Amino acid sequence: MAETVLKMVRDMSKARDLGADVVEIRLDYLKVFNSNQDLKTLIKESPMPTLFTYRPKWEGGQYDGDEKHRLDVLRLAMELGADYIDVEFQAAHEFIDSIDGKKPEKLKVIVSSHNYQDTPSVEDLGDLVARIQATGADIVRITTTALDITDVARIFQLSVHSHVPVIALAMGERGLISRILCAKFGGYFTSGTLHSEIVSVPGEPTIKDILDVYNFRLIRPCTKMFGVIGKPVSHSRSPLLYNEGFKSVGFDGVYLHLLVDDIANFLHTYSSTDFSGFSVGIPHKEDALKCCDEVDPIAKSIGAVNCIVRRPTDGKLFGLNTDYFGSISAIEDGLRGSHDKSNIIGSPLAGRLFVIMGAGGAGKALAYGAKQKGARIIIANRKYDRARKLAAEVGGDALSLADLANFRPEDGAILANSTSVGMQPNIDETPIPKHALRSYSLVFDAVYNPRMTRLLSEAAESGVTVVCGVEMLIGQAYEQFERFTGLPAPKELFRKVMDNCL
């Protein structure tokens, strides 16, 4: 999309260089448009096959002029050598009748329908496909709105069972998986944008992300699906990490961002063994445990699951918690490095005071892990009752988060943040004032985007050793990768990927 023909020509070359196969040219975005001259230029200068769209306002586009002129322009594009023409379902009969006997052999007519409210039932979608096909469409294009990620299951059913070429995609962040997994479920093509800030429909990923983050060209009908479940989830670097790992070991899988509102509903809807495993993030870790058929004893003790593996033999869900390993080992390494005690036998956490901010799933993992290493636990939480409950479980003490600002710990104490405070986009937030940090020996933040949160920056400025969430992410990812694939994790690659993207 661009406002001038010159910018469109430049953008077409950029899209080609990024790996696009077809360029969709949105004529309705042009501020000045000389149809005969500009169409000739666009077709001649395009380095790829062209798809022309002249979307009217009544279908979500920008064109607000005479309808006859709009269809005349699309016919002219056809005559001048366009490869694809997109015409809206409402105008399809008139347009296709008008080109009867004149349509070039190479031209494909895409008849499209956009639903900006919701995703209809499977029956209604099937009926819509039949009505679009009856117009004489070569390709059916249906775009809906995903109000919940489970809505996309109906899009997948439509793609799999359609007897005509179909482009079926769902808008919005909850619909992202439709744009990646269409390669698995038989979609004709997907769409991506050059820049994340310029999209034709809500939730459209960039070409670079489609090809380089999600390895779109490697996805086949037998590809196994994995992903990170969270709300929010778009900040997660896990898809880049795992997809690079899958590619490096030749594993046929794809790992996605999964914006989930109700994890039980999600797991019930996507119950096929092709949906093989999930990392579980905030705020679903405790609910995830209830959804599993079997739970690792450590995860059961923690009361939270951050990894779910679907057993291929019977589809049963097995839950475990790798946060325990990742966070505690990262903190131990930080203590050993800061005090040069690598030769000491046992954990450097033994006997130390370990203060945890947050009493959710990540907080429980930290509390359980620190207790196992011999630390003494204090839980600080916004809701004091939750802090007291977790503290009782691990034999520790409780504080309200507000009281932590004036708490004076003993020498050598550890402070660990397990909340989402300070996570992108709220990078100016911190769970505790700077003046309260100087009393600690080490500060750990489970947030990894940004790498240096405000909490860690202020702790470092106060002369305190800091450990960032990236170290936890890498540590817990090793085990999850091996659980998902049955193969050794490419550890050096994981660290390189995280260093590059953060």
Image (spheres, rainbow, N blue to C red):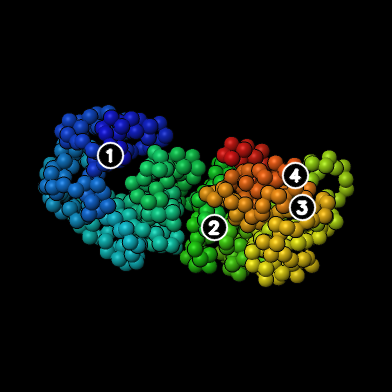
Q: CA distance from mark 1 to mark 4?
A: 55 Å
Camera-side mark, 1 or 3 = 3
Name the kind of residue labelled 1 in the image. Ile
Q: Residue at x 32, y 58 (%)?
A: 116
Q: CA distance from mark 3 to mark 4?
A: 10 Å
Considering depth in this image, is 112 or 315 the residue closer to the camera? Answer: 112
Residue 156: x and y, percent? 40, 58
Left or right of 143? Residue 443 is right
Residue 143: quarter of image: bottom left
Residue under label 4, please give it: 464
Residue under label 2, please give it: 230
Considering depth in this image, is 305 or 163 the residue closer to the camera? Answer: 305
Camera-side mark, 1 or 4 = 4
Which numbered disc, 3 or 4, marks the residue that appears first in the sequence?
3
Residue under label 1, please give it: 25
Name the kind of residue labelled 3 in the image. Ile
Left or right of 85? Residue 465 is right
